[in-house]
Amino acid sequence: MSTRKRKNYSREFKLEAVRLITEKGYSIAEASRNLGIEYSVLRRWKRQLADDPQYAFPEKGRLKAADQELRQLQRELERVKEERDILKKALAYFAEDQK
């Protein structure tokens, strides 16, 4: 098993690499050879930028706005479910008490 280290590229580098393809007229294969990046990686960067130019390539540990909102809503839903379960148990306890 190899222990290759994963390369991290800055957002600026990714934007410039995609710009070579879209604005300078390089093919993906040619740009990937010149930059030393896998063809599939460069193709994925191009697709990501085309799909969502504003939020493409978030920095490490950062989420897109939609993903961040989804995560926040999931946490809130979990909290509300816990509160509901506590209230159900309390209701059952007090209902037994009155019998």
Image (tube, rainbow, N blue to C red):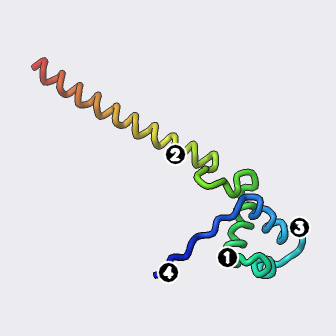
> Which amino acid is tagged 4?
Ser
In this rendering, which labeled residue sits more in front, label 3 or label 4?
A: 4
- Residue 20, quarter of picture: bottom right
Mark 1 and mark 3: Cα distance apart in space: 19 Å
> Which amino acid is tagged 3?
Glu
Instruction: Identify the secondary structure beneath mark 3.
Output: loop
Q: Does 93 sit above or below residue 34? A: above
Going from N to C along the chain, the mark reached first, 2 or 1, is 1
Q: Is residue 11 left or right of residue 88?
A: right
Instruction: Identify the secondary structure beneath mark 2.
Output: helix
Q: Circle 4 is placed at which residue position?
A: 2
> Which amino acid is tagged 1?
Ser
Q: Circle 2 is placed at which residue position?
A: 71
- Residue 84, quarter of picture: top left
- Mark 1 is surrounded, within 10 Å at the Cα level, by few (under 14), some (14 to 19) or many (20 or more) other residues, namely few
Q: Circle 3 is placed at which residue position?
A: 23
In this rendering, which labeled residue sits more in front, label 4 or label 1?
A: 4
